[in-house]
Amino acid sequence: MSLVLYNSLTRQKEPFQAFNPEQVGMYVCGPTVYDRAHLGNARPVVVFDVLYRLLRQLYPKVTYVRNITDVDDKINAASLARNIPIHQLTAETTAAYHHDMASLGALPPDHEPRATAHIPQMIAMILTLIEKGYAYAVEGHVLFQVEKYQDYSDLSRRNQDELLAGARVEIAPYKKNPEDFVLWKPSTEEQPGWESPWGRGRPGWHIECSAMSAEYLGETFDIHGGGIDLIFPHHENEKAQSCCAHGTKMMARYWLHNGHLTVSGSKMSKSLGNFFTVHDLLQNHKGETIRLALLMTHYRQPLDWRPEVLSQAKQTLDRWYGILNDLDGASSEISEGYAVLEALQDDLNTPQAIVELHALANQAYKAESISEKMKFAQQLKRSADLLGLLQENPQEWSQQSPTVSLTEQEIDSFIQQRQQARQDRDFSRADEIRQELLEKGIQLEDKAGQTFWRSV
Ligand SMILES: [Zn+2]
């Protein structure tokens, strides 16, 4: 099977064909560095990290570019609110972002361009757009004239009314049409600004990605990714700018978008009190647990984050690390092939890939000889590598997670013994078993006549 990806542009799964199979290019929109990354920011990072790892298996060279937006009105506001200089805020937030994403097992991209280091490229692109008649300068602003680009909206498929509503149009008398969007805007003395043919000012957000993707990947490249909320207006505008400036039909051949993230059924928001950063989560959970929890849902589906998702991910990892630990750390080097390859090549089907890993783990448990066990454990380790999982030292993981000393079968057998004891009205024995399990890190819970367990 070869790689198939769902393309938001055509609304269908398509076989992936690289422009140049010797070098695949992928651009993913990165963070605006004014605050610590929240869980919704982490989802695309982990999803596209799996795609990056997969592409590197399939192609000799992959260039992955993810930008840093370090000029933005939210940054200006946060710098004022915290009373620290902008450069300090963006440097600190970028460092925190790197730390948090590395904790989730995300590989660094090949290039991580900062917007403020690419202002001349943005100005040059804006000049080209004016010269070609797609943009106009007025009162220190430069605006992209949407009606000049015929293919506008073929990515987000919005009609005129939706375009207007969605663009959250500001009252701006200098605009020729309300849907026209900003390429450049003037800065006050206090705001960050750069000299330009239109006076001192700063770029709009969308032009950053058009200029930086062209700089590192060329005028047309293979994959452009990001969260679903970026389709409009950000990606629609990026595409308009790039195609018009370069005179190309397409900016990227495949547009990939991950679904929304909700928390216990609601939109994550500070006012609802269900807002948390990756940093918050890392205080109580290991990065790999969060990573697996994010990958248990297919990337295009909405992900509803609940506490059970994390405990399920932890149980799974405890079990898998337990297998590696029992065998004194199976190495991925010896095994060949990836049990998860087919699933991942099918539009990054990570839930199916996780099913395959469970199957290997079960085979390792059931295997009768040590050499058989070793074989499956090695396959498990190697296949998990492709998802960026089981990257930690199994012994260290197991020391922190007492549950790995028990297999699921063993826990089940304890639960059965306890049930028997209760049926025999030997309650002290039943309590003893519960206590024994608790000491091994397993908490029992009786609900609706059934016993459930979780690791603690
Ligand atoms: Zn972007």
Image (tube, rainbow, N blue to C red):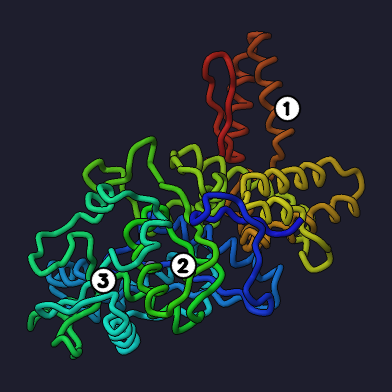
The disc labelled 3 sits on which kind of residue? Phe
Residue 386 image label: none
Q: Is mark 3 within 8 Å of ligand 1?
A: no
Distance between mark 2 and mark 3 Cα atoms: 23 Å
Task: Name the residue beneath numbered marker 1.
Answer: 413
Task: Name the residue beneath numbered marker 2.
Answer: 28
- Residue 287 left/right relative to 322: left
x and y, in percent, of residue 35 in the image: 28, 64
Q: Quadrant of residue 253?
A: bottom right
Quarter of the image that includes the N terminus: bottom right
x and y, in percent, of residue 13 in the image: 61, 51
Which residue is at a point 22% across and 60% down the rendered structure image? 179
Bin the neighbour count of mark 3 within 10 Å (Cα to Cα): few under 14, some 14-19, many 20 and up: many
Q: Is mark 2 within 8 Å of ligand 1?
A: no
The disc labelled 2 sits on which kind of residue? Val
SS category of the residue bearing label 2: strand
Q: Quadrant of residue 41?
A: bottom left
x and y, in percent, of residue 262 in the image: 38, 42
Bin the neighbour count of mark 2 within 10 Å (Cα to Cα): few under 14, some 14-19, many 20 and up: many
Residue 144 image label: 3
Picture layout, residue 296 above or below residue 237: above
Going from the N terminus, do you reach mark 3 or mark 1 first? 3
Q: Is mark 1 within 8 Å of ligand 1?
A: no
x and y, in percent, of residue 428 in the image: 60, 18
